[in-house]
Amino acid sequence: MSAVAVRALFRSHPERPAHTEPMSRCIDACFNCVETCTACADACLSEREIGHLVACIRLNLDCAAVCNATGNILSRSNKAGHRQLLEAQLANTIAFCRTCATECAHHAEIHRHCRVCAEACAACAEACNDMLSAMRMPA
């Protein structure tokens, strides 16, 4: 689902959720990260020598799983009573994305797919951080 579609859904939501712009960007970045990390793991597995990519593959798959959960949780915009849990989920996503970005950056000169993945992970960490900041400000 694109950020445009998410924004349209939030505008039509009966409860008019707060922080729809950063939330839309965060959801979009999370699902982009899922796709990119999954594709990067697959590309790593297709390399001739994958021994040095094992940590990268594992982080790709873990980051994809965490981002998928975060995107799904944020898509359900009614968060009454779950603020601390959502903040913890966003912080966890930021940590996974930054770690995955760092690992992929180690391989970026040799493997273009790792460069693309590092960029997507960094963008997702930034979008999640923006969402976290928006949650801490008055709506």
Image (tube, rainbow, N blue to C red):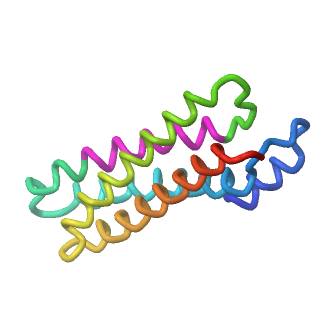
Q: Nearer the viewer, residue 138 or 63?
A: 138
Q: Nearer the viewer, residue 37 or 126?
A: 126
Q: Nearer the viewer, residue 133 or 98?
A: 133
Which residue sits at x=64%, y=40%?
Answer: 74
Which residue sits at x=55%, y=57%?
Answer: 127
Classify residue 85 as left or right of residue 136.
left
Q: Which residues are magenta?
A: 58-74
Classify residue 128 as left or right of residue 58.
right
Question: Which corner quadrant of the image does residue 112 belong to?
Answer: bottom left
Image: 77 above or below 130:
above
Which residue sits at x=9%, y=61%?
Answer: 49
User: Per the image, is 57 magenta?
Assistant: no
Q: Position of residue 20 (x, y in %)?
A: 75, 51
Q: Position of residue 10 (x, y in %)?
A: 81, 47
Classify residue 4 as left or right of residue 25.
right
Q: Position of residue 30 (x, y in %)?
A: 53, 51
Q: Position of residue 8 (x, y in %)?
A: 83, 54
Classify residue 118 as left or right of residue 72.
left
User: Per the image, is 69 magenta?
Assistant: yes
Which residue sits at x=28%, y=47%?
Answer: 59
Outermost residue on the top side: it is 81
How many labels sit on residues?
Answer: 0
Outermost residue on the bottom side: it is 109
Q: Nearer the viewer, residue 81 or 75?
A: 81
Image: 78 above or below 114:
above
Q: Main secondary structure of the magenta part?
A: helix
